[in-house]
Image (cartoon, rainbow, N blue to C red):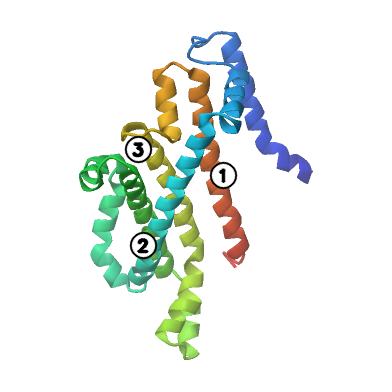
Amino acid sequence: MKRLDQLLPIVGVIGLIVVWYVAVWCEVVDPVLLPSPTQTFWALWKGMTGGVLGFDFFMTVRRTIISTLIAAAIALPLGIFLGSSERLYRSVEFVIDFFRSTPASAMFPLFLVLFGVGDKTKISVAAFGAMLVILFNVAYGVMNARKTRLLAAKVMGASRLRVLTDVMLLESLPQTFIGLRNGVSLALVIIVVAEMFIGSTDGLGHRVFEAQQLFEMPDMYAAIFAAGALGYGLNLLFLLVERRFVHWSGK
């Protein structure tokens, strides 16, 4: 029974491919615009093993990781600092929520003025968007640390620094990992969009846009699937790390 449960996610994949084949055979969409799964996955295989898609994939991964690392390096200590004082966080909460709610694409012109056309703009916009998401989650994780454990630590004579490092940080880790997962997902979205529209010569976003302009539809869908696989893989990676290091969550 457990083995069958483990195979359940494959059912959706098979269903999607079957519906796709039926749509192609029935010509629900113009065959020029919707290639078959076979053509698409062959284009994906060729692009990743010996074509330019593999290089584009690497460049998107590189930009996403750099922007996430920058965001985490800023947001983690700042979120802990703000979260350790609820009054301090409330004083800047409007600013954080305002920019967190602002579409990152609306910030492109500002970052273009500051950094020009190039990787700096793509990475800085993605880092900015991811940083706010991570900061929000870290701060709330620290503020919502279980009061009973905080009180117990204080009663036993733990210093404020000890309470922060040994209790608050551990209690905030589940929320922190949620912020990191959301942050890396948002960074990937921003990077791909930026690669489409901000003078890129590589990256998955550039590959999707170029293939669409040249009507190379199998290559376009291959790039889209590569971006989706990357997003899924990054999310899965953070989930595995979280289960490894925050196995005590909720206990």
Q: Secondary structure at mark 1?
A: helix
Pick whichever, 210 or 162, lies toward us.
Answer: 210
Residue 148 showing in the rendered view = no
Residue 244 showing in the rendered view = yes
Apparent side of residue 18 relative to residue 78 in the rendered image (left or right): right
Does residue 35 lie above or below 151 as drawn? Answer: above
Mark 1–mark 3 distance (CA, rounded to whole Å):
21 Å
Label 2 vs 3, first from the N-terminus: 2
Residue at horizontal 22 percent and vertical 48 percent from the top: 114
Does residue 29 lie above or below 179 as drawn? Answer: above
Q: Secondary structure at mark 2?
A: helix
Query: Label 3 belongs to which residue?
Result: 194
Instruction: Say which of marks 1 and 3 sits in front.
Output: 3
Residue 17 position by quadrant: top right
Q: Amino acid at mark 1?
A: Gly
Locate the C terminus and report the quarter of the image it occupies. bottom right
Mark 1–mark 2 distance (CA, rounded to whole Å):
24 Å
Pick whichever, 44 or 107, lies toward us.
Answer: 44
Query: Label 1 belongs to which residue?
Result: 233
- Residue 109's spot in the image, x, y percent? 22, 40
